[in-house]
């Protein structure tokens, strides 16, 4: 006789051995598996067949693990780009502030001071745009 809990335990073991090791995604996948089994059982499908159907719908462990790894890599890349944007803002401000202080004290700027001011402003605005866009995508 089919034992659903034993089958789900075996499914979890397969997920773990295939690389899906994070507890939160694994719990979420199991929740989806159980919901799908319950949904199909309510439609009159035998529990064993409902389990097989639900496993097929969720997909093989190797594919899921690959998708989780892609998602994690994308998140890391987004964080790195966001940090680069923040660093751009900091460097840009480090160039803008001294140029502005010189202007306030001398009421004029040399060619180099203007160049630092323009470059710093561009770096600040560009870094801010990059950081903000990656933060919104998170």
Image (spheres, grey):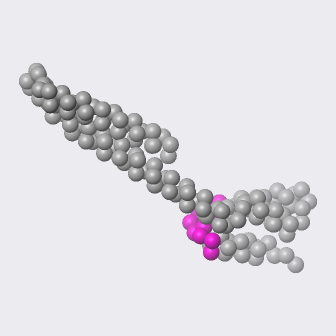
Q: Which image quadrant is residue 85 in?
A: top left
Above or below: residue 8 compared with residue 86: below
31 is higher (above) or lower (below) than 117: below
Q: Quick check: 112 left or right of 135?
A: left
Q: Is residue 65 left or right of residue 4?
A: left
Q: Position of residue 17 (x, y in %)?
A: 62, 75
Residue found at x 87% / y 57% = 42
Image location (x, y in percent) of residue 44: 91, 60
Of residues 28 and 122, the one drawn nearer to the viewer in this rendering: 122
- Magenta stretch mostly in which secondary structure? helix
Residue at 89 percent across and 62 percent down: it is 45
Residue 48 percent across, percent down from the top left:
85, 69
Instruction: Please tell me in which quadrant of the rendered image residue 66 appears.
Output: bottom right
Q: Is residue 95 left or right of residue 19?
A: left
Residue 18 covered by magenta stretch? yes
Residue 132, magenta (yes or no)? no
Specify whether 138 is left or right of 50: left
- The residue sitting at 52% across, 57% down in the picture is 72
Estimate the x, y position of residue 22 in percent, counting from the top left.
56, 66
Q: Residue furthest right?
A: 44
For the magenta stretch, what is the residue range? 17-28
Relative height, residue 10 to residue 77 (above, below): below
């Amino acid at each position: 006789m089919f034992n659903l809990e034993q089958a789900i335990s075996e499914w979890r073991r397969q997920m773990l051995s295939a690389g899906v090791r994070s507890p939160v995604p694994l719990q979420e996948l199991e929740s989806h598996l159980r919901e799908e089994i319950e949904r199909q059982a309510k439609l009159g499908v035998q529990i064993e067949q409902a389990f097989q159907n639900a496993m097929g719908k969720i997909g093989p462990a190797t594919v899921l693990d690959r998708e989780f790894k892609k998602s994690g890599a994308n998140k890391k890349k987004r964080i790195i780009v966001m940090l680069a944007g923040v660093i751009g803002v900091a460097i840009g401000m480090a160039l803008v502030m001294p140029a502005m202080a010189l202007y306030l004290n001398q009421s004029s700027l040399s060619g180099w001071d203007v160049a630092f001011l323009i470059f710093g402003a561009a770096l600040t605005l560009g870094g801010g745009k990059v950081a903000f866009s990656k933060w919104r995508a998170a």
